[in-house]
Structures are given as C-alpha cells and as structure tokens.
Amino acid sequence: MFNDHKRRSVDEMLQVIESTGMKREIIEQYFSTVEDITELYHIIEKKLHAKKEEEMIRRLRAYVEKMNYDLIKLVETQNQNTKGKKDNQINV
C-alpha cells in the first residue's frame, strides 16, 4: 500500500515536471532516483509558485492603480459639482 502511494506521488511529481516542457525520458535519464526527482520537483514547484506570486502582484498593482484612477475621477467630479452649486448660489 505504501509503495502505491509513493509511486503515485512520484508520478504526480513527474507530471508537474513534464508540464514545464521536459520529456519524461530525459528526466528519468538524468534524475534516476526518487530523491533526485523529488529535489527537481521541489525546485520547479518553488519556481512555479514564485511565478504565480509575481502574476498576483502584477494584477494587484493594476487593480490598485485602477482604483486610484477611479477615486481621482470621482473626487474631480464631486469638486466640479460642488463648484457648480457654489456658482449657482452666487448667481441667485
């Protein structure tokens, strides 16, 4: 039972490694032990995680920039409305 779980785990690691474009034959040729595959997997996993974090930060910055722009436009609109009301009061 334990070997099945361990084998499945190695297969899952190989699938993640393969998703980066590496061929299984090459992986198995140069990373022949489970420990080697596990080490490669962890390196790739860290890189993928860092890439996802960078994308999340980029999206968050874009969102904050948009929110700032929208806030500035809202304040400008409110200032114009307030100025228009004051002008109307003066003319009355």
Image: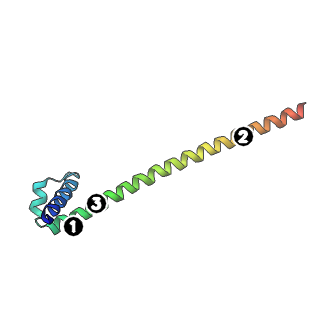
Spatial separation of the CA atoms under disc 2 and disc 1: 58 Å
| Residue placed under numbered mark 3 in the picture | 45
Whether the residues at callouts 3 and 1 have beta carbons within 8 Å, the answer is no
Q: Quadrant of residue 70?
A: top right
Check residue 78 in the rendering and tell me which mark sits there, or answer none. Answer: 2
Residue 39, which numbered label? 1
Residue occupying the point 36% across, 54% down: 52
On the rendered image, what quadrant is the N terminus found in?
A: bottom left
The residues bearing labels 3 and 1 have C-alpha atoms spaced at a distance of 10 Å
Within 10 Å of disc 1 (Cα), the crowding (few <14, some 14-19, many 20+) is some
Amino acid under disc 1: Glu
The residue under label 2 is which amino acid type?
A: Gln
Among the two numbered marks 2 and 1 on one chain, the one whose residue lies closer to the N terminus: 1
Residue at 79% across, 38% down: 83
Query: What is the distance, in whole Å, between disc 3 and disc 2 at their CAs?
Result: 49 Å
Q: Are marks 3 and 2 in contact (CB under 8 Å)?
A: no
- Vertical relation: 2 (above or below) 56: below
Q: Secondary structure at mark 3?
A: helix
* Label 1 secondary element: helix
Q: Residue furthest bottom?
A: 35
**On screen, 24 above or below 82?**
below
Label located before the other in sequence (3 or 2): 3
Front-most of 12 and 41?
A: 12
Q: Amino acid at mark 3?
A: Glu
In which quadrant of the rendered view does residue 39 lie? Answer: bottom left
The x, y position of residue 50, in whole percent, is: 35, 59
